[in-house]
Amino acid sequence: MNIILLGPPGAGKGTQARMLVEERGMVQLSTGDMLREAKDSGTEMGKIVADVMARGALVTDEIVIGLIKEKLETVKANGFIFDGFPRTLAQADALGDLLATMNETLDAVIEMRVDDEALVARIVARSTCAGCGEVYNDNTKPIPADGVCTNCGQSKEFKRRADDNEESLKTRLMEYYKQTSPLIGYYYAKDSLSRVDGLGDIEAVQAEIKVALDA
Ligand code: AMP
C-alpha cells in the first residue's frame, strides 16, 4: 500500500508517518528530511537548497522529484508513505508516472486538516528529539523534566527547526495554499482522497487514519 499524507506544515504528518512505519512496516519518504540531510552534510545540492528552506519557500520540482525517484528505485518496501511530497501539481503528476512505471498504485491520500491558528501555535512550540525524532510541544507535551526522551529513553538532545519561526512559517503557509492545496481537488477527482481531523490528539488522529486506510 502506498499513501500520501497531505497537509500544511504542523498538521502532524511526520508524527503520523512514524506511527504507520512502526505499525505497518511501511517506509516513510519525507522530502523535508532528505533535504535537511543534504543541507547538514554540506552536499552541493544541500548548499543550493539551504537558503530556500530557511525562507520557507519551495525547493525546485526537479530536485525533489529526483530525490523521490532515487529512493523509489533503490529502497525495497512494504509500501511507502509520502510525507511532504508531492507539494505541487507537477510533483503529483511525476509521482503518478513513477508509480506507474513500477507497476505500483497510489492507494490513499489522507488530507490532515488543521486550522491556521492551531498550526502556528503548534509550530512555534515544537521541538524534536535529536535521537529518534519524537516530537515535543512546549504547551501540550513538554520535554520531560529529567531531560531524557520518553520515546527512545536515551537522547538528551532536543532540536528546534531553523524554519520553525513565525517569519518563515508565513511563507510556508502561503506556499501551501498557493501550490499544495490544489492537490486536494486533484486527488479528490482521482477518487483517492480521505479527510481526517488533524486537530485531535495523536491517538484520535491515528484512529481516523486507520479507518481511512482500512476502508
Ligand atoms: P517539511 O519538513 O516537509 O516541512 O519541509 C521543510 C522544507 O523543505 C520546506 O519548507 C521546503 O523548503 C522544502 N521541501 C520539502 N519537501 C518539499 C517538496 N516536496 N517540494 C518543494 N520543497 C520541499
Image (tube, helix red, strand yellow):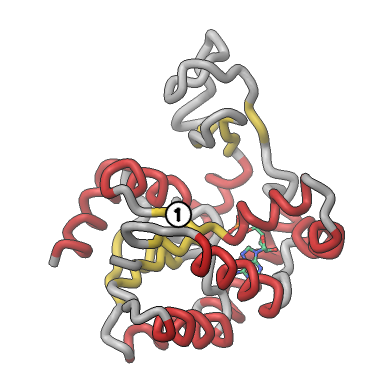
**35 or 173, which lies in front?**
35
The image quadrant of residue 146 is top right
Element type at marker 1? strand
Name the residue beneath numbered marker 1: 28
Quarter of the image for residue 202 reads top left
* Residue situated furthest bottom in the rendering: 189
Residue 163 position (above or below residue 191)? above
Q: Quadrant of residue 138?
A: top right
- Image spot of residue 9 (x, y percent): 55, 58
Residue 128 screen position, x and y as percent = 57, 34
Furthest toward the top, the residue is 146
Residue type marked 1: Gln
Location of the N terminus (image quadrant): bottom left
Query: How far across and down, in percent of the image, does residue 178 sit?
Result: 61, 80
The C terminus: image quadrant: bottom left
Ligand number 1: quarter of image: bottom right
Hey, which residue is sitting farthest left in the picture? 215
Q: Is mark 1 within 8 Å of ligand 1?
A: no
Position in image of residue 135 (x %, y %): 50, 36
Q: Residue at x 37, y 52 (%)?
A: 199
Q: Residue at x 27, y 49 (%)?
A: 24
Are there few (<14), some (14-19), or many (20+) residues within 10 Å of tag 1? many
x 21%, y 55%: residue: 210
Instruction: Please indicate whether residue 89 sits to the left or right of residue 157 in the image.
Output: left
**Left/right of residue 55 with respect to residue 67 in the rendered view:** right
Position of 166 compared to 4: left or right? right
In front of the other: 23 or 100: 100
Q: Can you say whether 95 is above or below 127 in the image?
A: below
- For image coordinates 40% across by 67% down, the residue present is 4
Numbered-mark total = 1
Going by the image, does 200 lie left or right of 126? left
